[in-house]
Amino acid sequence: MSDQTFFIETWGCQMNDLDTQRLSGNLKLRGWTRVDDESEASLILLNTCSIRDKAEQKVFSRLGELRELKSRNDVRIGVAGCVAQQEGDRILKRAPWVDFVMGPGNVGHLDEVLEGKRVATDFPEDRRYDYLTMDRPSATKAQVTIIEGCNKNCTFCIVPTTRGREVSRPFDDVVAEVRAAIDSGRVEIELLGQTVNAYRCPITGRDFGALLSAVAEVPGVLRLRFMTSHPAEVNDSMIAAMRDHRNISRYLHLPVQSGSSRVLRRMKRLYSREKYLEVMARIREAIPEIHFSTDIIVGFPGETEEDFQETISLIEEVGYGSLFAFKYSPRPGTPSLKIGEPVDDAIASDRLTRIFEAHERIKRERLDSYRGKVLPVLYDGPSRNDPSMMTGRTDDNWVVNFSGDPAIPLGSLIGVRIDHAQHHTLRGEAVT
């Protein structure tokens, strides 16, 4: 086994995926080799997520599996990500075979950690965001962080604790990274942030809409996407940028969490049901073809059947193409722990099932509406489930598996005639 081989296991959101790209790129720049088998690594990194229930138990269970490997090999083990930030030195006390713990704010300070800093859970002013060393796994897409942290303090959310307060990157730095990504052959850009549309340039004050426009106008950007937006941060500048630039994806993930204004107040979401619907209407008026997706939490403390029915009616009123729903899971140190007990698990499970049942018809109608149409699809490569098929995404973010000439270059925009819809995807044949 080489002295400089590393293995990274990544859990959670796109921000964690991007942190892994940064960590991997940093190590490769310094002569390390990434391996796919943990038993061949001299450094093992667990890049963890704390959003879901029992996240820390899952981490300690995984560390237990790695303990035997540690006893056999001369290997260093590090815990990174949000559970590392949340648990800090408690990880070292419960799992003393772990060599270091590093929170998301220290991804750019990996060198100092490897040199002997066992606990790095502060939020340095210098985030050291070196995009030129990024180890991007996709040949066609580049993810670009524009803002880290969150100031919203929703009562159920641990992100402000694990990711810290909002820190926006300078406007020109973001555009420079986009240009570098395009120069490297990528054609799709995805801007990322916990609350991506809260972006404000720390130097000029330019907002998210201004940044969207600037990135969309970089030559070679065929498609521009972004995640995750907060309804309270949607403004006219953002809507106008999306309307005026056809290469900005006609897909918007706008988490509502609940359709009940009473529950939204308890969640401290900073908008009511009426305000959320008003925002959706403004966007849809400007961009009629928009595909909305959302996140929903069921079983929040105090949620009544009436509250839940308001969520069902909101799903039907908006007509989300895609929907992600979860049972409420208490997170350590969050204010919702003091609001009251969660809804009984059996009731919450039943509500979750009813959410998916209510959404299924809406999703099916949306997917079926594409039959017979020719859609521009950004070609990503062979389908994972059927390598004989090609795959890519539409402008509004649906996955399309299609037959065509595999010699077409990756990153091409291809016209695909949609023959039929599957459960979550479309299927068709390339025509151009």
Image (tube, grey):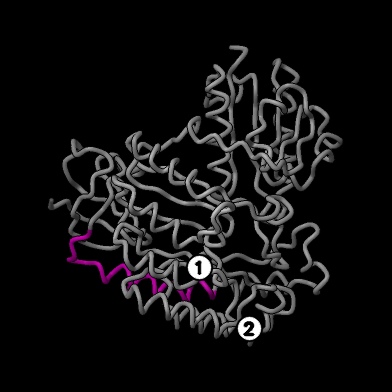
Q: Identify the residue at image location x=35%, y=54%.
A: 216
Q: Is residue 50 left or right of residue 429?
A: right
Majority secondary structure of the magenta segment?
A: helix
**Up-down relation of residue 108 to residue 239 (above or below):** above
What kind of element bears circle 2?
helix
Residue beneath disc 1: 254
Check the image and report above or below for 431 versus 242.
above
Q: Tell me the tag on residue 370.
A: none
**Residue 106: x percent and y percent?**
68, 37
User: Considering only vertical position in the picture, is 411 above or below 265?
Assistant: above
Residue 396 in percent (x, y) is at 34, 62
Q: Which residues are magenta?
A: 354-375
Residue drawn 44% across the image and 68% down it: 237
Estimate how packed mark 1 is, as few (under 14), some (14 to 19) or many (20 or more) residues with alpha carbons within 10 Å. Answer: many
The kind of residue tagged 1 is Leu
Q: Earlier in the sequence, mark 1 or mark 2?
A: 1
Q: Which residue is mark 2?
A: 261
Instruction: Check residue 107 for magenta coloring.
Output: no
Residue at image coords 70%, 42%: 125
- Mark 2 neighbour density, 10 Å: few (under 14) some (14–19) many (20 or more): some
Q: Residue furthest right?
A: 93
